[in-house]
Amino acid sequence: MTRIFLLSLLVLSLFSMAKAQPDRWQQRVEYKMDIDFDAKNHQFQGTQSLNYFNNSPDTLRRVFYHLYFNAFQPGSTMDVRSRTLPDPDRRVTDRISRLQPNEEGWHQINSLKMNGKDCRYEVNETILEVWLPEPILPNTAVTLDMDFHSQVPVQIRRSGRDNQEGISYSMSQWYPKLCEYDYQGWHADPYVGREFYGVWGDYEVNISIEKKFILGASGILQNSSNIGYGYEPEGTAVRWEPGDKLTWRWKAENVHDFAWSADPDYKHQQLKRKDGLVLHFLYQENEKTKENWEALPRVMDRVFDFVNEKFGQYPYKSYAFLQAGDGGMEYPMGTFITGERGFPSLVGVCVHELMHAWYYGLLGSNETLYYWMDEGFTEYASAEVINFLKQEKLLPGTPKDNPHLDTNNDLIVFSRMGREEPLSIHADHFSTNSAYGVAAYVKGHVFLTQLEYILGSPAFNSAMLRYFNTWKFKHPNPNDFLRILEKQSELELDWFKEYFIYTTKTIDYAIKSVEKANRTQTRISLENAGSMPMPLDVTITYKNGRQEIFNIPLDLMRGEKSSEFAGVKFSILPDWRWTHPDYEFVINEKFKNVVRVEIDASQRMVDVNRTDNVWVQKESQDKETKE
Ligand SMILES: [Zn+2]
């Protein structure tokens, strides 16, 4: 074998190895930050050394950073957006416009160099625009060194000082953060209060702050024996550095953001799970928190058992539940939640934010474009987890057969109001906050309930796990997700994507008639009265109580699902072509023996008018009303 031949074989095999994985390039960062915190003035000096790996095929002449704190200044894009929306977030309203200079947030950039050479830059409110002294060539890395000075705003949205429950510092979106550049280009969106997208990489963050503060963070503390406060290994004699500050050295690897919080009154509880994962709980202990937070670790431990198995293994060694922020907000390896809540609410918010660790933290879809792949999928998973906790009697309430039913109905109610906007709208550009909320949380959730109905639960559940394992750490888009479902089910789903993401068309099927076809057979006539086609499950109940499901595939699917319900006869009928308003089929059963016919008896399809989905035999109808 010649060397060249050997080499080409090697190249070929490397190429095919790459093909086995999603072969999309992505950028990478390594942040090292030293933060000197001045709690008296709520300001800090920072240095940031950022190794930036340009794995793209493109030559980059510019880069962009997010400067989120600059949003908290009167007249900012976020301020004006909030004051001009018809239904602003009640936490924001006009509060930014009323900030005094010592209450505002800001980042001042003192210097920025690339590989030691000065960069030209301009602060354009929440985006730092940078012209590089030399282009960054494809597949090369550079170091960007920045000196900055920042002021922490009073708590208005997500981050800030002195939140409503008296937590001193909720530090999220708190440092100059490089914008993501991907196959769709730069994502340098001005901050108006919506969510995030970041570059995968490693963070080393050293925070020097007065000794009285206790910190929690979305990372792992590296110098616990010099800090204490419950972080030190059991039995360690803690040795504090001299001086009036402690330097907390944090590391987080393979994440796309880093957040921390600080308070002098934090109580720090932790739980080490059987698999080695350490759960941290930091909260101010008082009569509103004590009992509920003490009961929380045991429940969250069980949640990890359930979720690791159902939705994929959590890969990090730490997760922190931090009382901070203004409700519940997810970060990699941790969350900010307000803590003075009743137990079901506390568990509910912890479960929701924790599920973000999978869809925001580990899959990391672009939330400006695909917010619903995070919020909606998180809501779907949370509903499953809450149901599990009720089954386990760790939460009060009766578990449901279908924990997603209420969400389906919420979408129907909102779409009737005529204010729904499609999932293809950029997160910042909705006409109302409520339309964003419904799209992200409700329709994103229903997106999955519809696919579960179309594929059948067994194929859908395997596909969700396969999606996580295939796309974790890779920023999937909607098409990436649907391709996994297509491969798992051998069904075509492009039609579903086009209707459900790009339109607000609705589903409405009806039973037109059920009648005697002849002496031994019954004819069932159906109608598509809606604007979006779907496959149908039609359940027929016979006089003797037996039930049977007839599945009508949609022609566009090029296949059909398998039976989902053990012990119920399941038959596949010919396809319903999407252009045809009507469909008819005949069953081998005498008309008088058919007592009930129902479209989608499982009620999983978001049919906007369910009253015409059921037909009941006259005789039994009379009986039903008498009962
Ligand atoms: Zn959420």
Image: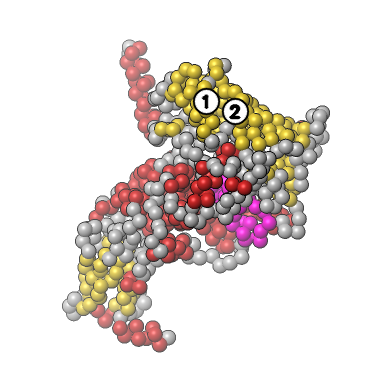
Magenta stretch, residue numbers: 327-356
Q: Position of residue 98 (x, y in %)?
A: 62, 47
Q: Nearer the viewer, residue 48 or 403?
A: 48
Compared across the picture, whether 334 is left or right of 477 comes to right
Q: Identify residue for label 1.
A: 121
Residue at image location 38% in from the left, 83% down from the top:
624
Q: Percent position (x, y) of residue 384? A: 51, 57
Neighbor class of circle 2 (other Cα within 10 Å; few <14, some 14-19, many 20+) is some
Dot label at residue 210: none
**Magenta span includes 315:** no
Residue farthest along the bottom direction in this orientation: 626
Q: Can you tell me whether the CB of the residue at mark 2 lies under 8 Å from the nearest atom of ligand 1? A: no
Pointer 1 local density, CA inside 10 Å: few below 14, some 14–19, many at least 20:
some
Q: Is residue 412 visible?
A: no
Q: Does the residue at mark 1 contact the one at mark 2 (Cβ under 8 Å)? A: yes
Q: Is residue 126 left or right of residue 517?
A: right
Q: Within the magenta stretch, is there residue 328?
A: yes
Q: Identify the disc placed on residue 109.
A: 2
Q: How many marks?
A: 2
Instruction: Give the mark nearest the N terminus, 1 or 2.
Output: 2
Q: Nearer the viewer, residue 345 or 236?
A: 345
**Relative to 64, 417 lies left or right:** left
Helix, strand, or loop for circle 2? strand
Q: Give the vertical position of 277 relative to 204 (above or below).
A: below
Q: Residue at x 62, y 39 (%)?
A: 105
Return the residue nearer the eye: 590 or 98.
98
Residue 92 point in image, percent of width and height? 58, 51
Q: Is residue 229 above or below residue 84?
A: above
Q: At label 1, which amino acid type do we have?
A: Tyr
Q: Quadrant of the C terminus?
A: bottom left
**Which of 72 and 15 lies nearest the eye of the viewer?**
72
Q: Is residue 594 visible?
A: yes
